[in-house]
Image (cartoon, rainbow, N blue to C red):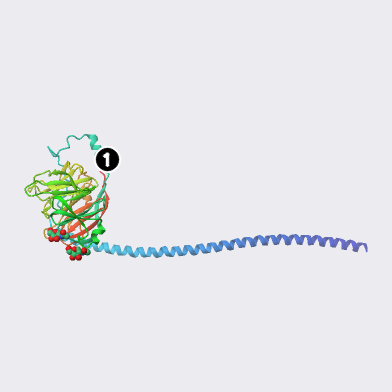
Amino acid sequence: MKPLLVFLVSTAWAFTRGQYYYQELMNYLENRMLAIEDRMELWNEQTHRYHSELKEFKKLTAETMNALGKDHSLLLKDLEGAAARVDHVEREMDYLETQTAPRACANKADKVLEQGAWSVEESRTDEEEEEDWEEVHCVDILSSIRSVKILKRVGSPKGMWIRDPRSSKVYVFNGTRGHSIYQFSSVLDFSSSPGVNHSRQIQLPSVWMGPGSTVYNGYLYYIQQEAGTEVQVVKYDLLSGSVTDTAMFPVESHAPVYTLNPETTADLAADDEGLWLLYANSDSEPNINLAKMDPATLDIEEMWDTRCPRENAEAAFIVCGTVYVVYNTRLASRSRVQCVFDVNDMVLSEEAPLLYFPRRYGAHASLKYSPEEKQLYAWDDGYQILYRLTMKRKLLV
Ligand SMILES: *[C@@H]1O[C@H](CO)[C@@H](O)[C@H](O)[C@H]1NC(C)=O
Ligand SMILES: *[C@@H]1O[C@H](CO)[C@@H](O)[C@H](O)[C@H]1NC(C)=O
C-alpha cells in the first residue's frame, strides 16, 4: 500500500505541476495572439490608408497627364500658327526687298551739340551728368506689337485721340485743325457711345493745328498756327479750362515733320521721361529733329538730330526716350517702324528690329503712346485703334 500511495501523491504532484506549466503556456500564447491581432489590425488600417492614398495619387496623375496632353496640343497649334506667320513675314520681306531701298536708318545718330540760344550742354558738370544717369529709370524698349483692337470709326480720315492717364478721360481731335475737341469720360464711354452725341465739347481759346497734340499730367499741349503768325506750343489746363503757358516754336520752319502727313507741322509726345517735340528744321532738312521740353515751363532743354528721314514717314512715337519713326508709302501699304533714335544712346539699332503693324485700312494720321498702359492710340483712316505693345529691357551699356 505504501509505495502505491507514494506513487499516487507524486503523480498528482507532477500532474498539478504539468497543469501549471500548461496554463502558463496557454497564457503566453494567448498574449502573443492578442499582440499579433493588434498588429494585424494596425496593418490593416495602414494598408487601407495606403490604398486610398494610392488611389488619390493615381487620380491626380491622370488629371495632370490629361492637362499636359491638352497643353501639348495647344502648343502644337501655336507652333503651326507661328510657322505660318513666319512664312508670311518672309514673303513680305522678299517682296519689300525687291521694292524698297535699304533700311532708312542704320546708325545711331549722334547728339547734336547745338550752339547758341538752345544750348545747355556747356554749363553741365560731370556731377550733373551723373545725376542724369541716375534719373534714367525707364528701361523699356519696344519688342513687338502684341495685339490690335479696332474700337470704332468716328470723324474724318485724319485726326487723333488720346487718353489722359490722370483722369482716364479720352480726348478726340477730329480732322486736321479745329477750334474744339471732344471729351469722353473713359475709353469704354468712347467706344460704346453711338457717335460724339454724348461727349462734352471743349472750345479751345485758339485753333489747334494737325494731329500733334498730347496730354500730360492733366494738361493739354497743342500746336497753334494761325494765319500769318508763328507756330506756337500752347499749354492748356484741362481742369480749369485756361491757357497756362505758350512758347514759340524753336525754328521758323513750317515744314511738316512727316512728309506723308503734311498737316503735322510738329508732333508733341509724352512718355515716362517727360514731354518731347518732334519737328523739321526746314524744308531742305531731310531729318526729323527732336527737342526735350520742360512740361511746366515749355522751356527747351536739349535738341537732337534723330538722323531719321522725314521722307515717307507717317508718324512717330516715343517710349522711354527712344523715338520710333513709322514709315509707309504714298499708296498706303503696311506701316513699319524703320528708324529708331535713343537720346540715352542705349538702344542699339540691332536691338530694334524692323517692326510691322498689322494690316489696316489706310495710313496712320497719328500714333500716341500711353506709358501707363503700354499701348498706342492710333487714328487710321477714321478708325480709332489700340495697339498693345510688348516691351523688353534695354541693354545697359
Ligand atoms: C469731323 O470732321 C469732318 C471734317 O473734317 C466733318 O465733316 C465731320 O462732321 C466731323 N465729325 C465730327 C463727329 O465732328
Ligand atoms: C446721335 O446723333 C446723330 C446725328 O448726329 C443721330 O442720328 C443719332 O440718333 C444720335 N444718337 C443718339 C443716341 O442720340
The residue sitting at 37% across, 65% down in the picture is 69
The residue sitting at 91% across, 62% down in the picture is 3
Residue 222 in view, yes or no: yes
- Tell me residue 84's x, y (percent): 24, 64
Q: Secondary structure at mark 1?
A: helix
For the C terminus, the quadrant is top left
Left or right: where does residue 22 sit relative to residue 259?
Answer: right
Tally the numbered discs.
Answer: 1
For the N terminus, the quadrant is bottom right
What amino acid is labelled 1 in the image?
Glu
The image quadrant that residue 27 belongs to is: bottom right
How dense is the environment of label 1, judged by Cα within 10 Å: few (below 14), some, or many (20 and up)?
few
The image quadrant that residue 80 belongs to is: bottom left
In the image, farthest residue toward the right = 1
The image quadrant that residue 377 belongs to is: bottom left
- Tell me residue 307's x, y (percent): 14, 47
Q: Nearer the viewer, residue 349 or 125?
A: 125
User: Looking at the image, is 135 positioned above or below residue 165?
Assistant: above
Left or right: where does residue 149 sit relative to residue 178?
Answer: right
- Tell me residue 56's x, y (percent): 48, 63
Q: Quick check: which quadrant has ligand 2?
A: bottom left
> What residue sits right under mark 1 in the picture?
134
Residue 102 in view, yes or no: no
Q: Nearer the viewer, residue 166 or 71?
A: 166
Tell whether circle 1 marks a residue whose Cβ is less than 8 angstroms from ligand 1. no
- Tell me residue 216's x, y (percent): 22, 48
The residue sitting at 18% across, 47% down in the picture is 242
